Amino acid sequence: MSQDIVADALNMIRNAKKARKETVKINRISNVLIEILKIMKQKGAIKKYKINAKEKSVEVTIGEMTECRAIKPRFTVNKDQIEKYRRRYLPARNLGTVIISTNKGLLSHEEAQEEKIGGCLIAYFY
């Protein structure tokens, strides 16, 4: 285990998907990870997630998803650069989501472009 909770969790989800598992239990959680899971649930990449406060863990049910990864190093982008990084990390025009940390919280790349704000690249999935 590394120090990056988000990268570890996304790797666990990706490995479980490749192993054809339906659920995965992540033993280390953070507020950023919970926000990423919310966005992934909205987009259908995961079906549901259940937080266990006593054990400080979360159980994730995997949905329709091929790939999910954390972006390292966490590039800082302005509103004009989002499209460049979307093309770098996502395979097709209308496929996938890049998650950006902005001053309004975590947003998908579409929401960040609508609100015309930049931020820090966190992760992507498709």
Image: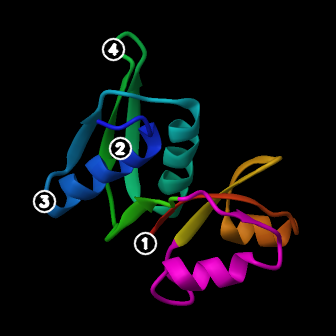
Above or below — where is 53 with respect to 110?
above
Q: Is residue 52 above or below residue 31?
A: above
Dot 4, crowdedness within 10 Å: few (<14), some or many (≥20)? few
Q: Quadrant of residue 88?
A: bottom right
Using the image, tell me which numbered label, if any, was put on residue 8. Answer: 2
Mark closer to the chain start, 3 or 1? 3
**Label 2 vs label 3, nearer the camera:** 2
Q: Quadrant of the N terminus?
A: top left
Q: In the rendered view, does 98 fall on the left or right side of 101?
A: left
- Give the alpha-carbon distance from disc 3 to disc 1, as whole Å: 17 Å
Mark 2 and mark 1 residues within 8 Å of each other at the beta carbon? no
Q: State the residue at coordinates (58%, 86%).
A: 87
Rendered residue at 50%/77% (across/down)? 89
Point out the stretch of residues depicted in magenta.
Answer: 73-96
Q: For residue 55, which numbered disc appears in the image?
A: 4
In which quadrant of the rendered image does the C terminus lie? bottom left
Measuring from the top left, give residue 98's x and y in whole percent.
58, 67
Colour style of the rendered protein structure: rainbow
Q: Earlier in the sequence, mark 2 or mark 4?
A: 2
* Tag 3 and tag 1, C-beta contact below 8 Å: no
Residue 20's tag is: 3
**Residue with the mark numbered 1:** 126
Report the mark closest to the observer, 2 or 1: 2
Who is closer to the viewer here, 43 or 12? 12
